[in-house]
Image (cartoon, rainbow, N blue to C red):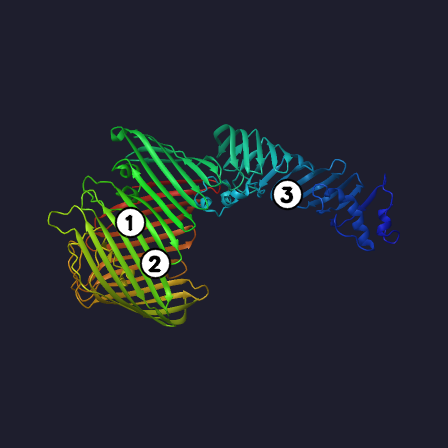
């Protein structure tokens, strides 16, 4: 019997006897069925929805109160027994589960779904396709015959609330290093199997599976690498896959067999082997390093990196990282027993980096130590590492308040001596007590600052002593549209107490010096365009005057002061010396002008050019040992340009020109060409009068296919020989990377 709207109302239809009766609904078009849609008041539409509600209502059993939707070319069923969808059949369940097939059959008595022909299951973003599926919907148990699968989605991992702050990809520990992340290739983990057995919603077992992260579905060639196993278990709760009696195949060749292989299904950190490093050096011979990563907890981990060095022996190393809301750090160490190239010595290196912050307290403790003077020379492969000669051991704790802070600091060193050129180690600070206070824009616009420094300096061969500095300042910034003037007055009171002085030499030294300065400038703006881009150009002339009287400081200790680098920032400094041991007598004016091009849309600085010079109104008499007084009327001229000159080119250049000798004292010119993210060419020329003239060229460029070339040459034109050369290539196979580099 086929009811119609004219023969029965919806309520009458609900009361029709259905035991043993069969209701058929056929349609050539796809129909949308809703188990929880309200019935229409009357009419044909209400009748159809009511009939479909009777057939599909059992599909709500797994998730009570949610909706299920179905459509097909042909639908038939028996109330309280089953429903069959044929031709472009599709069933959608609340929560995102989607079933499609040539034929779908739901058996209400067993709450079981049967699918045949081009079956596709999308669940939590993961996709399974194959010829046949049988699944109980209430507990998600069943099987899929000959499935292809792609693990594109992830289930919510069941993590304790107190540890969830560490499991995000944006967390500092994750961002610092995520060594085991196979799905970073851009392709999800995917493969095929003889059978997929669904244990429950979160667990799937695969028979004779293949798993890989290479290429997307539909690739005609076999993947570059894959795991072939007897069985494989996928746990979406922990996002862990376990393969048993497995082998790893690379380029068609089995490279590893194991009774048990565990791997992550997403980008979560997981214990396991990291890619090895192989190298050959003229000093150490063949080297092989095989790191192993332990994911001990969401907020701390351990990496072990044993290394076989053919000429020396077995080196063991480890790296521990930890992170919490109030502290974080890293502990790293490596050692080699009985170094065969060093008369059987035991050699090691240790380093730590630790920070904490809790309430008003912050602090850090850093330590670097090696077993001997030549450790970096023997074990490092770069000039920067092998040239290290002074290793700091540094710790500080700070108490912070809104307008002031107090720091207790200690600094010691390990000095690695050069047998050819002995090094005099710097003074150590143990302890150093620092106080800084500031109140800005008070009493009508005044800025007040106060710095106090009390330090004990220790040295193994030179005279040790104490230094006390009291340095207040007051300024009155006047800021107006288009100009500014900032007068400032500061005072430095310094006291020294020196031990181990020769007989008759003074042990106490005092110095009291005021300093006055005025900083001023103008800012002009105009709208312009460059390379088709709307910009705002500024012209910013600036004058800076500073005056400090002369005090003889030739007999004062020299603990931590030195001449600062001559650059644009130093042009506007009140004291050309760093530290408190020397305060120069100054009576000088700095004149400079800058122009900037600023993006009108986002305010980003595109390009900057600056020109400046210092004029001495009286000679500068305070010097460092071995330095001559400055009796010129003007300093060298500084010129700098930096920024983006076109879409692909950026430039960074600077020149220090001496009007006295009418020549360049120092210069650098660098240009970078970046037409695309994977293409870059850098070239730089560096010159320093008398001791340095170098050309440095580096590049990364695609060669062919997925092969990228890299190279660098640092050449000394003064010595007519290369200082450092490097060449290599990288093959990016989308799911694996090979890098080969040679350096000298």
Q: Which residue is mark 2?
A: 437
Q: Quadrant of residue 705?
A: top left
> Residue sitting at 36 percent across and 50 percent down?
398
> Is 382 rendered above or below residue 685?
above
Judge from the rendering whether residue 23 lies leftward or rightward of residue 170; answer left or right.
Answer: right
User: In the image, which disc is placed on residue 124?
Assistant: none
Q: Element at badge 1?
A: strand
Q: Tell me: 379 left or right of 505.
A: right
Q: How many marks?
A: 3
Question: Mark 3 — residue?
Answer: 122
State the SS at label 3: strand
| Residue 531 visible to the viewer | no
- Horizontally, residue 581 falls left or right of residue 610, namely left
First in sequence: mark 1 vs mark 3: 3
- For the point 36% across and 66% down, the residue is 596
Residue beneath disc 1: 432
Q: Quadrant of the N terminus?
A: top right
């Amino acid at each position: 019997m086929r009811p119609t709207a004219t023969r029965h109302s919806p309520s009458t239809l609900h009361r029709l006897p259905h035991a043993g009766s069969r209701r058929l609904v056929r349609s050539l078009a796809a129909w949308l069925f809703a188990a929880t849609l309200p019935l229409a008041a009357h009419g044909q539409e209400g009748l159809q929805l009511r009939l479909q509600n009777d057939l599909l209502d059992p599909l709500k059993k797994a998730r009570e109160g949610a909706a299920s939707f179905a459509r097909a070319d042909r639908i038939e069923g028996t109330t309280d027994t089953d429903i069959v969808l044929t031709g472009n059949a599709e069933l959608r369940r609340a929560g995102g589960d989607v079933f499609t097939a040539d034929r779908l059959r739901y058996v209400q008595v067993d709450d079981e779904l049967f699918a045949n022909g081009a079956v596709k299951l999308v669940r939590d973003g993961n996709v399974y396709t194959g010829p046949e599926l049988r699944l109980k919907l209430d507990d998600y148990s069943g099987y899929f015959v000959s499935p292809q699968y792609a693990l594109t989605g992830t289930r919510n991992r069941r993590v304790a609330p107190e540890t969830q702050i560490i499991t995000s990809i944006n967390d500092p520990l994750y961002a610092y290093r995520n060594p085991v992340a196979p799905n970073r290739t851009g392709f999800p983990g995917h493969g095929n199997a003889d059978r997929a057995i669904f244990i429950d919603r979160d667990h799937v077992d695969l028979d004779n599976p293949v798993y890989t992260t290479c290429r997307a579905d539909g690739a005609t060639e076999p993947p570059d690498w894959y795991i072939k196993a007897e069985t494989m278990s996928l746990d979406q709760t922990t996002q862990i896959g376990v393969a048993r009696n497995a082998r790893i195949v690379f380029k068609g060749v089995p490279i590893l067999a194991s009774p048990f292989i565990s791997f992550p299904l997403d980008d979560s950190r997981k214990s396991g082997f990291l890619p090895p490093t192989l190298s050959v050096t003229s000093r150490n011979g063949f080297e092989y390093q095989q790191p192993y990563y332990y994911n001990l907890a969401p907020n701390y981990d351990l990496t072990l990196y044993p290394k076989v060095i053919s000429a020396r022996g077995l080196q063991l190393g480890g790296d521990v990282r930890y992170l919490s809301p109030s502290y974080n750090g890293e502990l790293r160490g490596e050692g080699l027993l009985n170094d065969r190239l060093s008369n059987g010595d035991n050699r090691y290196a240790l380093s730590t980096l630790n920070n904490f912050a809790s309430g008003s307290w912050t602090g850090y403790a850093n330590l670097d130590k090696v077993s001997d003077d030549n450790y970096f020379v023997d074990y490092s492969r770069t000039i920067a590492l092998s040239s290290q000669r002074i290793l700091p051991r540094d710790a500080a704790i700070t108490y912070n308040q809104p307008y002031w802070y107090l720091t207790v600091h200690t600094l010691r060193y390990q000095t690695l001596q050069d047998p050819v050129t002995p090094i005099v180690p710097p003074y150590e600070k143990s302890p150093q007590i620092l106080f800084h206070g500031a109140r800005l824009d008070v009493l009508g616009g005044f800025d007040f600052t106060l710095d106090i420094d009390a330090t004990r300096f220790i040295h193994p061969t030179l005279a040790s002593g104490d230094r006390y500095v009291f340095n207040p300042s007051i300024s009155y910034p006047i800021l107006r549209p288009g100009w500014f003037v900032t007068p400032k007055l500061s005072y430095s009171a310094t006291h020294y107490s020196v031990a181990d002085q020769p007989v008759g030499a003074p042990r106490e030294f005092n110095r009291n010096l005021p300093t006055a300065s005025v900083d001023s400038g103008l800012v002009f703006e105009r709208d312009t365009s460059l390379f088709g881009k709307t910009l705002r150009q500024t012209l910013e002339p600036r004058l800076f005057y500073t005056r400090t009287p002369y005090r003889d400081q030739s007999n004062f200790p020299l603990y931590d002061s030195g001449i600062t680098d001559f650059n644009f920032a130093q042009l506007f400094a009140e004291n050309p010396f760093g530290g408190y041991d020397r305060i120069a007598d100054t009576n000088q004016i700095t004149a400079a002008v800058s122009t900037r091009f600023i993006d009108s849309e986002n305010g980003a600085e595109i390009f900057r050019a600056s020109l400046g010079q210092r004029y001495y109104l009286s000679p500068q008499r305070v010097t460092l040992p071995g330095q001559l007084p400055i009796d010129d009327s003007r300093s060298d001229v500084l010129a700098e340009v930096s920024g983006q000159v076109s879409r692909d080119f950026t430039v960074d250049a600077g020149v220090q020109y001496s009007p006295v000798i009418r020549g360049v004292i120092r210069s650098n010119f660098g240009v970078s060409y970046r037409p695309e993210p994977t293409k870059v060419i850098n070239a730089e020329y560096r010159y320093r009068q008398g001791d340095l003239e170098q050309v440095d060229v580096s590049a990364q460029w695609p060669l062919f296919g997925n092969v990228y070339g890299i190279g660098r040459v640092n050449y000394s034109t003064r010595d007519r020989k290369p200082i450092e050369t490097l060449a290599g290539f990288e093959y990016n196979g989308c799911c694996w990377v090979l890098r080969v580099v040679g350096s000298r």
